[in-house]
Amino acid sequence: MSASTDSGIPEAIPPADVSRETWNSPEVDTPIGAEAERAVRLMQAAVQGQLPRPKRQRVFTVANQKGGVGKTTTAVNIAAALALQGLRTLVIDLDPQGNASTALGIEHRPGTPSSYEVLIGDISVEAALQRSPHSERLYCIPATIDLAGAEIELVSMVAREGRLRTALGELKHYDFDYVFIDCPPSLGLLTINALVAAPEVLIPIQCEYYALEGVGQLLRNIEMVKAHLNPELEVTTVVLTMYDGRTKLADQVAMDVRAHFGDKVLRTVIPRSVKVSEAPGYGMTIIDYDPGSRGAMSYLDASRELALRGGDEGGGDR
Ligand SMILES: Nc1ncnc2c1ncn2[C@@H]1O[C@H](COP(=O)(O)OP(=O)(O)OP(=O)(O)O)[C@@H](O)[C@H]1O
Ligand SMILES: [Mg+2]
Protein backbone atom coordinates (compact mmCIF):
# COMPACT_ATOMS: atom_id res chain seq x y z
CA MET A 1 0.00 0.00 0.00
CA SER A 2 0.97 3.57 -0.41
CA ALA A 3 3.17 4.91 2.35
CA SER A 4 2.24 8.53 2.16
CA THR A 5 -0.20 11.16 1.03
CA ASP A 6 2.45 13.61 0.05
CA SER A 7 0.30 16.21 -1.65
CA GLY A 8 2.69 19.10 -1.32
CA ILE A 9 1.21 20.35 1.93
CA PRO A 10 4.10 20.94 4.32
CA GLU A 11 4.61 18.26 6.96
CA ALA A 12 4.43 20.78 9.78
CA ILE A 13 0.85 21.86 9.09
CA PRO A 14 -1.02 19.95 11.76
CA PRO A 15 -4.27 18.19 11.07
CA ALA A 16 -7.07 19.00 13.50
CA ASP A 17 -6.65 17.54 16.99
CA VAL A 18 -3.25 15.97 16.42
CA SER A 19 -0.23 17.20 18.39
CA ARG A 20 -2.52 19.93 19.67
CA GLU A 21 -0.60 20.92 22.73
CA THR A 22 2.61 21.79 20.90
CA TRP A 23 1.05 23.51 17.95
CA ASN A 24 -1.29 25.73 19.92
CA SER A 25 1.46 27.04 22.12
CA PRO A 26 1.08 30.85 22.05
CA GLU A 27 4.85 31.40 21.72
CA VAL A 28 5.16 29.22 18.64
CA ASP A 29 3.79 30.63 15.44
CA THR A 30 6.01 29.11 12.77
CA PRO A 31 6.44 25.53 11.59
CA ILE A 32 10.17 25.64 12.39
CA GLY A 33 9.43 26.99 15.87
CA ALA A 34 6.91 24.21 16.44
CA GLU A 35 9.39 21.59 15.27
CA ALA A 36 12.11 22.96 17.55
CA GLU A 37 9.73 22.95 20.49
CA ARG A 38 8.77 19.32 19.81
CA ALA A 39 12.42 18.28 19.62
CA VAL A 40 13.08 20.00 22.97
CA ARG A 41 10.11 18.18 24.52
CA LEU A 42 11.47 14.88 23.31
CA MET A 43 14.93 15.62 24.71
CA GLN A 44 13.38 16.60 28.04
CA ALA A 45 11.45 13.32 28.14
CA ALA A 46 14.74 11.50 27.55
CA VAL A 47 16.62 13.38 30.25
CA GLN A 48 13.88 13.14 32.85
CA GLY A 49 13.02 9.49 32.12
CA GLN A 50 10.00 9.97 34.28
CA LEU A 51 7.75 7.07 33.28
CA PRO A 52 6.87 4.58 36.02
CA ARG A 53 8.10 1.02 35.65
CA PRO A 54 5.16 -1.37 35.52
CA LYS A 55 4.87 -3.59 38.60
CA ARG A 56 5.00 -6.59 36.31
CA GLN A 57 6.62 -7.02 32.93
CA ARG A 58 3.96 -6.06 30.35
CA VAL A 59 3.83 -8.17 27.21
CA PHE A 60 1.77 -6.98 24.22
CA THR A 61 0.84 -8.79 21.05
CA VAL A 62 0.50 -6.23 18.27
CA ALA A 63 -2.06 -7.76 15.94
CA ASN A 64 -4.45 -7.01 13.11
CA GLN A 65 -4.74 -9.46 10.25
CA LYS A 66 -5.30 -6.57 7.86
CA GLY A 67 -2.01 -5.75 6.13
CA GLY A 68 -0.28 -2.40 6.24
CA VAL A 69 -2.29 -0.84 9.07
CA GLY A 70 0.74 0.22 11.12
CA LYS A 71 1.41 -2.81 13.35
CA THR A 72 5.16 -2.74 12.87
CA THR A 73 5.45 1.04 12.87
CA THR A 74 3.47 1.22 16.12
CA ALA A 75 5.41 -1.61 17.79
CA VAL A 76 8.86 -0.22 17.05
CA ASN A 77 8.07 3.45 17.68
CA ILE A 78 6.21 2.94 20.95
CA ALA A 79 9.04 0.63 22.04
CA ALA A 80 11.67 3.24 21.12
CA ALA A 81 9.72 5.98 22.89
CA LEU A 82 9.47 3.90 26.08
CA ALA A 83 13.19 3.12 25.92
CA LEU A 84 13.92 6.83 25.49
CA GLN A 85 12.04 7.45 28.72
CA GLY A 86 14.08 5.02 30.75
CA LEU A 87 12.24 1.72 30.33
CA ARG A 88 13.86 -1.51 29.16
CA THR A 89 11.99 -2.68 26.11
CA LEU A 90 12.06 -5.69 23.79
CA VAL A 91 10.52 -6.09 20.34
CA ILE A 92 10.01 -9.66 19.14
CA ASP A 93 9.71 -9.76 15.37
CA LEU A 94 7.29 -12.59 14.59
CA ASP A 95 6.71 -11.63 10.97
CA PRO A 96 8.78 -13.38 8.27
CA GLN A 97 8.87 -10.02 6.44
CA GLY A 98 11.30 -8.88 9.16
CA ASN A 99 10.06 -5.29 9.01
CA ALA A 100 10.45 -4.63 12.73
CA SER A 101 14.05 -5.87 12.61
CA THR A 102 14.75 -3.58 9.63
CA ALA A 103 13.12 -0.59 11.32
CA LEU A 104 15.24 -1.08 14.44
CA GLY A 105 18.46 -1.42 12.43
CA ILE A 106 18.90 -5.04 13.60
CA GLU A 107 20.82 -7.69 11.64
CA HIS A 108 18.42 -10.29 10.22
CA ARG A 109 20.13 -11.91 7.27
CA PRO A 110 19.47 -15.66 6.78
CA GLY A 111 21.47 -17.57 9.39
CA THR A 112 21.06 -14.91 12.10
CA PRO A 113 19.74 -16.45 15.35
CA SER A 114 16.11 -15.41 15.27
CA SER A 115 12.55 -15.79 16.50
CA TYR A 116 12.21 -18.89 14.32
CA GLU A 117 14.77 -20.92 16.30
CA VAL A 118 13.38 -19.55 19.56
CA LEU A 119 9.87 -20.59 18.54
CA ILE A 120 10.78 -24.15 17.63
CA GLY A 121 12.92 -24.46 20.75
CA ASP A 122 16.32 -24.78 19.08
CA ILE A 123 17.94 -21.83 20.87
CA SER A 124 17.39 -19.75 23.98
CA VAL A 125 16.04 -16.20 24.01
CA GLU A 126 19.47 -15.05 25.08
CA ALA A 127 21.07 -16.45 21.93
CA ALA A 128 18.74 -14.41 19.71
CA LEU A 129 18.68 -11.09 21.60
CA GLN A 130 20.26 -8.10 19.87
CA ARG A 131 20.60 -4.58 21.20
CA SER A 132 19.46 -1.64 19.10
CA PRO A 133 22.31 0.47 17.72
CA HIS A 134 20.34 3.56 18.79
CA SER A 135 19.40 2.80 22.39
CA GLU A 136 21.01 0.84 25.19
CA ARG A 137 17.58 -0.02 26.61
CA LEU A 138 15.95 -1.24 23.38
CA TYR A 139 16.38 -4.88 22.29
CA CYS A 140 15.06 -7.03 19.48
CA ILE A 141 14.68 -10.69 18.65
CA PRO A 142 14.81 -10.48 14.86
CA ALA A 143 12.91 -12.44 12.24
CA THR A 144 14.63 -14.01 9.27
CA ILE A 145 13.09 -15.54 6.19
CA ASP A 146 13.26 -18.93 7.99
CA LEU A 147 10.12 -17.92 9.83
CA ALA A 148 8.18 -18.15 6.55
CA GLY A 149 8.14 -21.95 6.88
CA ALA A 150 7.12 -21.93 10.51
CA GLU A 151 3.36 -21.71 9.92
CA ILE A 152 3.53 -25.08 8.16
CA GLU A 153 6.17 -26.68 10.39
CA LEU A 154 4.20 -25.79 13.49
CA VAL A 155 1.12 -27.67 12.31
CA SER A 156 2.66 -31.06 13.11
CA MET A 157 4.37 -30.00 16.34
CA VAL A 158 3.26 -30.92 19.84
CA ALA A 159 1.61 -28.03 21.72
CA ARG A 160 1.91 -25.98 18.58
CA GLU A 161 -0.01 -22.95 19.90
CA GLY A 162 2.05 -22.67 23.08
CA ARG A 163 5.59 -22.83 21.70
CA LEU A 164 6.32 -19.11 21.98
CA ARG A 165 4.85 -18.93 25.48
CA THR A 166 7.13 -21.76 26.59
CA ALA A 167 10.16 -20.17 24.97
CA LEU A 168 9.43 -16.77 26.48
CA GLY A 169 9.22 -18.25 29.97
CA GLU A 170 12.91 -17.34 30.02
CA LEU A 171 12.04 -13.64 29.79
CA LYS A 172 11.31 -13.51 33.49
CA HIS A 173 15.06 -13.65 34.06
CA TYR A 174 15.47 -10.42 32.13
CA ASP A 175 14.58 -7.05 33.45
CA PHE A 176 12.41 -5.95 30.53
CA ASP A 177 9.60 -3.59 31.43
CA TYR A 178 7.80 -3.88 28.09
CA VAL A 179 7.75 -6.56 25.40
CA PHE A 180 6.00 -6.09 22.04
CA ILE A 181 5.41 -9.01 19.67
CA ASP A 182 4.99 -7.81 16.10
CA CYS A 183 2.66 -10.17 14.21
CA PRO A 184 2.27 -10.90 10.50
CA PRO A 185 -0.95 -9.87 8.70
CA SER A 186 -2.75 -13.16 9.21
CA LEU A 187 -4.52 -15.11 11.90
CA GLY A 188 -2.35 -18.19 11.45
CA LEU A 189 -0.28 -20.10 13.97
CA LEU A 190 2.32 -17.34 14.39
CA THR A 191 -0.32 -14.85 15.53
CA ILE A 192 -1.99 -17.53 17.69
CA ASN A 193 1.39 -18.24 19.34
CA ALA A 194 1.75 -14.52 20.09
CA LEU A 195 -1.77 -14.35 21.56
CA VAL A 196 -1.04 -17.33 23.79
CA ALA A 197 2.24 -15.79 24.95
CA ALA A 198 0.99 -12.30 25.93
CA PRO A 199 -1.63 -11.05 28.35
CA GLU A 200 -2.28 -7.82 26.44
CA VAL A 201 -3.30 -7.17 22.83
CA LEU A 202 -2.62 -3.88 21.07
CA ILE A 203 -4.64 -3.40 17.88
CA PRO A 204 -3.52 -0.67 15.49
CA ILE A 205 -6.36 0.55 13.28
CA GLN A 206 -5.72 2.64 10.20
CA CYS A 207 -8.03 5.65 9.74
CA GLU A 208 -9.10 4.51 6.28
CA TYR A 209 -11.96 2.76 4.48
CA TYR A 210 -12.75 -0.71 5.80
CA ALA A 211 -10.84 0.02 9.01
CA LEU A 212 -13.02 -2.27 11.08
CA GLU A 213 -13.31 -4.94 8.45
CA GLY A 214 -11.84 -8.13 9.80
CA VAL A 215 -11.55 -6.79 13.33
CA GLY A 216 -14.60 -8.89 14.28
CA GLN A 217 -12.75 -12.01 13.17
CA LEU A 218 -9.68 -10.95 15.15
CA LEU A 219 -11.80 -10.40 18.26
CA ARG A 220 -13.45 -13.81 17.86
CA ASN A 221 -10.02 -15.45 17.61
CA ILE A 222 -8.89 -13.56 20.70
CA GLU A 223 -11.97 -14.81 22.57
CA MET A 224 -11.22 -18.38 21.47
CA VAL A 225 -7.60 -18.18 22.62
CA LYS A 226 -8.78 -16.64 25.90
CA ALA A 227 -11.33 -19.41 26.45
CA HIS A 228 -9.01 -22.31 25.71
CA LEU A 229 -5.38 -21.31 25.92
CA ASN A 230 -4.74 -18.01 27.72
CA PRO A 231 -7.38 -16.88 30.22
CA GLU A 232 -5.43 -13.69 30.99
CA LEU A 233 -5.73 -12.37 27.44
CA GLU A 234 -7.37 -8.93 26.99
CA VAL A 235 -7.45 -6.28 24.29
CA THR A 236 -6.19 -3.38 26.40
CA THR A 237 -5.08 -0.88 23.77
CA VAL A 238 -6.25 0.35 20.37
CA VAL A 239 -4.16 2.87 18.44
CA LEU A 240 -5.53 4.95 15.55
CA THR A 241 -2.86 5.24 12.88
CA MET A 242 -2.22 7.20 9.67
CA TYR A 243 -4.79 9.83 10.55
CA ASP A 244 -5.19 12.47 7.87
CA GLY A 245 -6.98 15.48 9.31
CA ARG A 246 -7.77 16.85 5.87
CA THR A 247 -10.30 14.11 5.27
CA LYS A 248 -13.73 13.73 6.87
CA LEU A 249 -13.29 9.99 6.50
CA ALA A 250 -10.48 9.89 9.06
CA ASP A 251 -12.72 11.56 11.67
CA GLN A 252 -15.57 9.22 10.86
CA VAL A 253 -13.35 6.16 11.26
CA ALA A 254 -11.92 7.51 14.52
CA MET A 255 -15.46 8.05 15.85
CA ASP A 256 -16.56 4.55 14.82
CA VAL A 257 -13.52 2.96 16.45
CA ARG A 258 -14.05 4.93 19.67
CA ALA A 259 -17.73 3.96 19.69
CA HIS A 260 -16.72 0.32 19.34
CA PHE A 261 -13.73 0.13 21.72
CA GLY A 262 -14.44 2.98 24.16
CA ASP A 263 -11.56 3.96 26.43
CA LYS A 264 -9.29 1.23 25.12
CA VAL A 265 -8.54 3.64 22.27
CA LEU A 266 -5.59 5.90 23.08
CA ARG A 267 -6.50 9.59 22.98
CA THR A 268 -3.32 10.20 20.99
CA VAL A 269 -3.85 9.67 17.29
CA ILE A 270 -0.88 8.93 15.02
CA PRO A 271 -0.89 11.32 12.04
CA ARG A 272 -0.06 10.22 8.53
CA SER A 273 3.44 11.53 7.99
CA VAL A 274 6.04 11.06 5.30
CA LYS A 275 8.82 11.13 7.90
CA VAL A 276 7.33 8.13 9.73
CA SER A 277 7.38 6.10 6.52
CA GLU A 278 10.93 7.20 5.64
CA ALA A 279 12.53 6.23 8.95
CA PRO A 280 12.70 2.41 8.43
CA GLY A 281 14.67 2.99 5.23
CA TYR A 282 17.48 4.28 7.47
CA GLY A 283 17.13 1.46 10.00
CA MET A 284 15.76 3.96 12.49
CA THR A 285 12.61 4.66 14.43
CA ILE A 286 11.01 8.08 14.02
CA ILE A 287 12.26 8.94 17.51
CA ASP A 288 15.86 8.75 16.26
CA TYR A 289 15.28 9.74 12.65
CA ASP A 290 13.45 13.00 13.28
CA PRO A 291 12.79 13.79 16.94
CA GLY A 292 11.23 17.13 16.05
CA SER A 293 8.54 15.65 13.81
CA ARG A 294 4.86 15.35 14.62
CA GLY A 295 5.22 11.59 14.11
CA ALA A 296 7.86 11.34 16.84
CA MET A 297 5.79 13.47 19.20
CA SER A 298 2.66 11.43 18.61
CA TYR A 299 4.45 8.16 19.35
CA LEU A 300 5.99 9.73 22.45
CA ASP A 301 2.51 10.79 23.61
CA ALA A 302 1.09 7.35 22.77
CA SER A 303 3.85 5.63 24.77
CA ARG A 304 3.18 7.83 27.79
CA GLU A 305 -0.54 7.12 27.68
CA LEU A 306 0.10 3.40 27.39
CA ALA A 307 2.55 3.42 30.29
CA LEU A 308 0.52 5.70 32.55
CA ARG A 309 -2.78 3.88 32.12
CA GLY A 310 -1.32 0.41 32.70
CA GLY A 311 1.77 1.09 34.78
CA ASP A 312 0.18 0.46 38.15
CA GLU A 313 -1.59 -2.73 37.24
CA GLY A 314 -0.42 -6.25 37.72
CA GLY A 315 0.36 -8.17 40.82
CA GLY A 316 3.45 -8.52 42.94
CA ASP A 317 6.66 -6.57 43.08
CA ARG A 318 9.62 -7.54 41.01
N1 LIG B 1 1.86 7.33 10.47
C1 LIG B 1 2.26 6.95 9.27
N2 LIG B 1 2.40 7.85 8.27
C2 LIG B 1 2.80 7.46 7.04
N3 LIG B 1 3.12 6.22 6.71
C3 LIG B 1 3.01 5.27 7.65
C4 LIG B 1 2.57 5.59 8.97
N4 LIG B 1 2.53 4.44 9.70
C5 LIG B 1 2.95 3.47 8.85
N5 LIG B 1 3.22 3.95 7.63
C6 LIG B 1 3.69 3.22 6.45
O1 LIG B 1 2.65 2.36 6.03
C7 LIG B 1 3.16 1.11 5.62
C8 LIG B 1 2.56 0.01 6.49
O2 LIG B 1 2.95 0.21 7.84
P1 LIG B 1 3.43 -1.01 8.72
O3 LIG B 1 4.48 -1.79 8.02
O4 LIG B 1 3.73 -0.50 10.07
O5 LIG B 1 2.08 -1.84 8.76
P2 LIG B 1 1.90 -3.35 9.18
O6 LIG B 1 0.50 -3.46 9.69
O7 LIG B 1 2.98 -3.78 10.08
O8 LIG B 1 2.05 -4.08 7.78
P3 LIG B 1 2.09 -5.69 7.56
O9 LIG B 1 0.69 -6.13 7.70
O10 LIG B 1 2.63 -5.85 6.17
O11 LIG B 1 3.00 -6.25 8.61
C9 LIG B 1 4.69 1.21 5.76
O12 LIG B 1 5.22 1.57 4.52
C10 LIG B 1 4.87 2.32 6.77
O13 LIG B 1 6.09 2.99 6.61
MG1 LIG C 1 4.29 -5.42 9.89
Image (cartoon, helix red, strand yellow):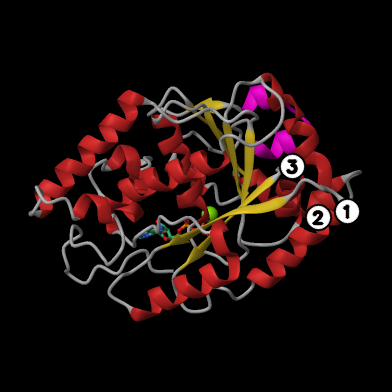
For the stretch drawn in magenta, what is the main secondary structure?
A: helix
Q: Which is nearer the N-term, disc 3 or disc 2?
A: 3
* Residue 68 percent location from the top left of the image: 50, 63
Determine the secondary structure under disc 1: helix
Type of amino acid under label 1 = His
Crowdedness of circle 2 by 10 Å Cα count: few (<14), some, many (20+)?
A: some
According to the picture, the residue beneath numbered tag 1 turns out to be 228
* Residue 13 percent location from the top left of the image: 18, 62
* Residue 149 percent location from the top left of the image: 72, 51
According to the picture, the residue beneath numbered tag 2 turns out to be 225
Question: Quick check: 132 left or right of 6?
Answer: right
Determine the secondary structure under disc 2: helix
Crowdedness of circle 3 by 10 Å Cα count: few (<14), some, many (20+)?
A: many
Alpha carbon distance from label 1 to label 3 = 13 Å
Report if the CB atoms under discs 2 and 1 are less than 8 Å apart: yes
Quadrant holding the N terminus:
bottom left
Alpha carbon distance from label 2 to label 1 = 5 Å
Tell me the quadrant of ligand 1: bottom left
Identified at 61% across, 46% down, the residue is 145
Q: Which is nearer the N-term, disc 1 or disc 3?
A: 3
Magenta stretch, residue numbers: 115-128
Task: State the mark number for residue 197.
Answer: 3
Identified at 64% across, 21% down, the residue is 174
